[in-house]
Amino acid sequence: MNRTTLSLIAGATALAAVTGFAALTAPAGTAAPEAKATTRLPVERAGLVCPVPSTSEVAETVYTSYTPPGTGTSTGSGSASGAGSAPGSGKTGQPTARLTPATSTTPSGGTAPGGKKSKAPQAPATVTTPGKPVTAEAKGAVVPALTGAATGTLAPGWTVQQTTVVEAGGARGLLGLTCGAPDTDFWFPAASTAKERQDYVHLTNPDDTAAVADIELYGPEGALKSQFTEGIPVPPRSTVPVLLSTLTGETAKPDVTVHVTTRSGRVGAAIGAADEKLGSDWIAPAADPASTAVLPGIPSDAASVRLVVFAPGDDDADLKVQLVTAAGTIVPAGAGSLHVKSGMTASVDLPDLTRGEAGSLVLTPSDPKKATPIVAALRVVRGKGADTEVAFIPATPAVSARATVADNRAKATTLSLTALGADAQVKVTASAGSGAGTPVSRTLTLKAGTTTAVTDLVPQGLNGSYALTVEPVSGGKVYAARTLAVPQDGIPMFTVQTLVDDRGTVEVPSARQDLGVLD
């Protein structure tokens, strides 16, 4: 193998450790390298995007930034290749995890009106060491979107939780969101253009070059006739909020599926949904289209649950609906099946679904030979009368290696774990507290076809909030979600975040040096 080929392999291996992707192409006239087993290395850089938390003057937001311990690089600088420090860090190779404000803009790309200067959190939510959460607070309606990156030993598993309390007004509620990685394709079932709803899709560009996004809307009869949805410019390091109801002239639809794609660049995307009667919360992106969907973490006291499903392909989907509880898997009364027409959004109300037991909903093909990809989400309501609160649960993939959710609080957190396919063992760790506290871990055995609710795993001597990390040990697939319940003045405010694998490591090819071919 000549030196050029060796350099290509070394460079591609380093690239994969940073970005999670590498491709090798042998120089013309030489044989391609022999395929070898891959190796998993820690990622060296991770990026996240947090949208504008609220437009309410009474909003109070907490950011919690956390990197779990245990998946670092072996070099003392915290960078496997010696490269990769955050912009402005001033220290090459020094691990960093930092959030910085983005510029708020209008859908046309101009600066947001109002004349008020954006205010960053009072203290930057900057992690300095794995294993300890760091928090920052921000108040009011002029808090900007945040973008950030973690490098070196702080990159693998870096997560940021954005939690906002709005005590009054049209956006009243507890709004929680795990800040997401920028991407090019997002699905959002359970959105709405109804008159009582104000749903904004927030597009945030973390990069130094402009992005261009498209938004498609699908209702019960198919694609909605829309305008101003193609070629939406998102300037560099800026955020653009788009009110869904302004994108179409059609009659208001209570259930809409939103598809966000980019034709250039990449964005972070999330939908802020506010219902004037039920409350408000974020809708996070659903798992990519698949023939099976798992929606974990339905609270035991859910007053109503609404399932929204969309079939993006050319075929209709016939689905079996099951509820996975602590006692086992059952079929909801009167809602054991659902037919979803191609290109249309279907919805069904599931009254008295949980009956006092936390559970997870599982959608599978009625006929395994006719597996049709779908996307799905739940709208969940707690409370009665005027004292209600709403949250959304998107379909989520299983945790393959490790997943973390931050901003957990004593006596307010419920972790739901659902095992499917076979019995499973998982290790759950409660981190140190943001103020003080000693981490604790527990290994749980989960019976196949059941959901286990964990409420008592809290750091010893806790002061502040803490993170929960889930790591599968053996057995079947495990799906996880966290419910944070913070009652306010008789309103059962809550939010649910699904746990998505943190992609703290990446596969890279193992290079083999062939000394038989030299220049």
Image (cartoon, rainbow, N blue to C red):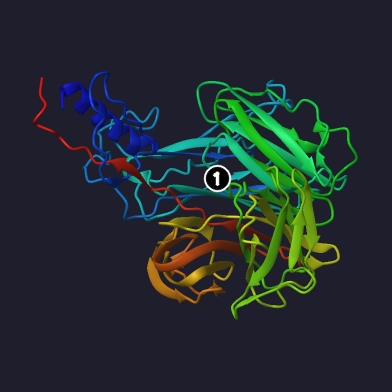
On screen, residue 178 above or below 367: above
Which quadrant would the C terminus be assigned to in this image? top left
Q: Which residue is mark 1?
A: 179
Residue 358 in picture, x, y percent from top left:
64, 72
- Residue 447 in picture, x, y percent from top left: 50, 77
Q: Position of residue 65 (x, y in %)?
A: 47, 48
In the image, taking residue 492 as reference, residue 413 lies left or right, namely left
- Point 40% across, 72% down: residue: 442
- Secondary structure, mark 1, is loop
Q: How crowded is the residue under tag 1: few (<14 C-alpha within 10 Å), some, or many (20+)?
A: many
Q: Residue at x 39, y 36 (%)?
A: 21
Q: Residue 231 occupies which quadrant of the picture?
A: top right
Instruction: Using the rendered view, name the quadrant where residue 3 is placed.
Output: top left
Q: Nearer the viewer, residue 217 or 279?
A: 217
Residue extending farthest to the bottom is 327
Residue 313 in picture, x, y percent from top left = 68, 43
Residue 53 visible within the image: no
Q: Is residue 272 above or below residue 106?
A: below
| Name of the residue lying farthest toward the right | 251
Residue kind at label 1, given as amino acid type? Cys
